[in-house]
Image (cartoon, rainbow, N blue to C red):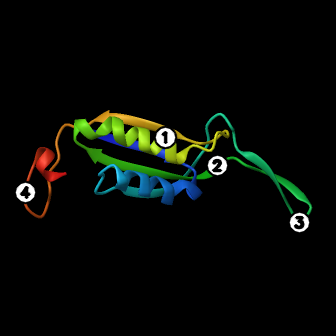
Amino acid sequence: MKLIIAIIKPFKLDEVREALSRVGVQGLTVTEVKGFGRQKGHTELYRGAEYVVDFLPKIKLEVALANELVDIAVEAIEQAARTDKIGDGKIFVCPLEHVVRIRTGETGEHAL
């Protein structure tokens, strides 16, 4: 089992969710986060004053999957989230050692 963590642009959320649904992903967790990478934020003008926005709004997706779905899901996220502009985000794939479904007590891939 693996945990996929993806940081994407907020306006790409619906496209990514639909792409994951098409490849058989049944659930995901979404969190609104702020951060920066190589783009290092940007400068904005408000009432004539210029100020720096260091942390940009992003969406963090977390998806727990069986190993055989990981490559398909990563490709779906990558294609749906891509704008070919700086700040498109990152995808991290981490090993997932143990999962328990609280309601039934199922463990491992059966709990996914």
Q: Who comes first in sequence, dot 3 or dot 1?
A: 3
Q: CA distance from mark 4 to mark 1?
A: 33 Å
Are dots 2 and 3 in contact, CB under 8 Å?
no
Q: Who comes first in sequence, dot 1 or dot 2?
A: 2
Provide the residue designation for mark 1: 78
Q: Nearer the viewer, mark 4 or mark 1?
A: 1
Provide the residue designation for mark 4: 105
Q: Who comes first in sequence, dot 4 or dot 1?
A: 1
Residue that appears at 55% across and 41% down: 89
Q: CA distance from mark 4 to mark 3?
A: 56 Å
Inspect the image, locate mark 1, and give the three-letter code of the amino acid beneath it.
Glu
33 vs 93, nearest the viewer: 93
Q: CA distance from mark 1 to mark 2?
A: 22 Å
Q: Who comes first in sequence, dot 2 or dot 4?
A: 2
Provide the residue designation for mark 2: 55
Residue 47 numbered tag: 3
Whole-percent x, y for residue 52 in the image:
77, 49
Are dots 3 and 1 in contact, CB under 8 Å?
no
Q: Secondary structure at mark 4?
A: loop
Quadrant housing the N terminus:
top left
Q: Dot 4 surroundings within 10 Å: few (below 14), some, or many (20 or more)?
A: few
Q: CA distance from mark 2 to mark 3?
A: 20 Å
Residue that appears at 28% across and 46% down: 64
48 vs 7, nearest the viewer: 7
Whole-percent x, y for residue 67 in the image:
23, 36
